[in-house]
């Protein structure tokens, strides 16, 4: 009776991350949920201070627990008394490591495995997994067809490990649900598939892939622009999609998030327009395909870039917008807000 009288408890994995921090913020702002967030070590005062600074007045409303996603017992404890799970944390290396299976692919699968296993026989009613538009953006088999929630990308040898990790982790999750005994099917599964995420950082850190890219652009650390296409979405729209999926997401449904599909150069244009006059040097140089071909002899990531070179594989995000009650923030506004926040936090070198 006591449990029924309280607000539902939502577990968010990896709350120190770019997306997860905004999910926590959005959950608390609704006033409808209690929030428990996983961190690697909630006794690490330096990391907790970053969270305190970012969450502000919301910090004391969050229950923090230490839980490594590779630790089944820790995850099981984290899921105790939880009604909904937003599983967001997943490894994202800036470059493909030598042992990709061990460092990227298997941890992503195991994260889903441990979360889903912990939910069997628990109070959990719905699990919302964060995937990626990489599992729906079809560069290889049907690049001329607009990709949407029904598109399932097949793994191939040209893919970088992160691509493979997202495809295999999503496949594992759906197969897990398919193989559950009827008595254990007490919770639903929804997957959210964001494109490249931009927008204001909530926490003073830029060590993730999305904000790391914006930081490198502002500091002019990129060798050039590659003609490749990205689906893009604002981080606060991603967070709202996760939170709205608690009530509005349909079981076994996939929700690609995209305000549009843009070239790398188009994503960088608003940064140049806004920040070049302030002294930041934003590259316009397009990388030579010949140079990338030479690099591909030694580098797997370069081989991947060649395989999607200038292929306009469009991603349609309207299904998720309609089903989950979203109105996407314009790309230009979102990209500028990302850069503004990095500068405000002092995470970008002054020009």
Image: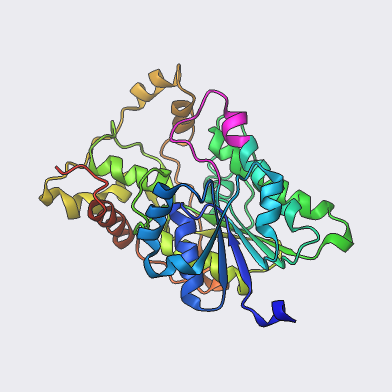
**What colouring does the structure picture have?**
rainbow
Q: Answer yes or no: is residue 157 visible.
A: no
- Name the one closer to the observer, 344 or 198: 344
Number of callouts in the render?
0
Up-down: is 36 above or below 347?
below
Q: Report if residue 252 lies within the magenta region.
A: no
- Name the one closer to the observer, 117 or 296: 117
Q: Residue 75: x and y, percent?
A: 67, 51
In the rendered image, the quadrant that contains the C terminus is top left
- Name the one closer to the observer, 76 or 107: 76
Residue 168 placement: quadrant: top right
Is residue 102 rendered to the left or right of residue 293? Answer: right
Give the residue displayed 62% in from the left and 69% down from the top. Answer: 9
Is residue 10 rendered to the left or right of residue 113? Answer: left
Give the residue displayed 46% in from the left and 52% down from the top. Answer: 16
Q: Residue 244: x and y, percent?
A: 56, 71
Q: What stretch is highlighted in magenta?
A: 90-105
């Amino acid at each position: 009776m006591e449990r029924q009288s309280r607000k539902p408890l939502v577990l968010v994995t990896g709350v120190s991350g770019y997306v997860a921090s905004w999910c926590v913020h959005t959950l608390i702002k609704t006033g409808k949920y209690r929030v428990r967030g996983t961190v690697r070590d909630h006794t690490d005062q330096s990391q907790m201070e970053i969270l305190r600074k970012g969450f502000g007045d919301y910090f004391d409303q969050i229950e923090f627990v230490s839980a490594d996603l590779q630790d089944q017992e820790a995850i099981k404890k984290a899921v105790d008394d939880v009604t909904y799970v937003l599983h967001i944390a997943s490894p994202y290396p800036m470059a493909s490591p030598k042992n990709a299976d061990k460092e990227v692919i298997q941890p992503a699968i195991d994260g889903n495995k441990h979360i889903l296993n912990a939910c069997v026989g628990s109070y959990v009613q719905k699990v919302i997994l964060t995937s990626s538009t990489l599992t729906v953006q079809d560069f290889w088999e049907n690049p001329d067809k607009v990709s949407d929630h029904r598109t399932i990308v097949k793994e191939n040898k040209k893919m970088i490990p992160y691509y493979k990790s997202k495809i295999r982790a999503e496949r594992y999750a759906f197969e897990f649900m398919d193989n559950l005994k009827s008595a254990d099917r007490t919770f639903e599964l929804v997957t959210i598939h964001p494109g490249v995420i931009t927008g204001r950082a909530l926490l003073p850190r830029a060590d993730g892939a999305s904000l790391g890219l914006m930081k490198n652009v502002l500091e002019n650390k990129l060798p050039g622009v590659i003609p490749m296409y990205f689906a893009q979405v604002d981080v606060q729209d991603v967070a709202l999609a996760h939170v709205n999926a608690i009530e509005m997401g349909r079981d076994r449904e996939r929700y690609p998030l995209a305000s549009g599909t843009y070239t790398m150069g188009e994503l960088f244009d608003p940064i140049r327009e806004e920040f070049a006059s302030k002294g930041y040097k934003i590259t316009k140089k397009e990388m030579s395909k010949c140079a990338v071909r030479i690099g591909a002899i030694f580098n797997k990531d370069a081989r991947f870039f060649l395989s999607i070179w200038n292929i306009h594989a469009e991603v349609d995000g309207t299904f998720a917008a309609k089903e989950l009650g979203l109105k996407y923030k314009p790309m230009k506004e979102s990209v500028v807000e990302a850069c503004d926040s990095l500068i405000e936090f002092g995470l970008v070198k002054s020009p």
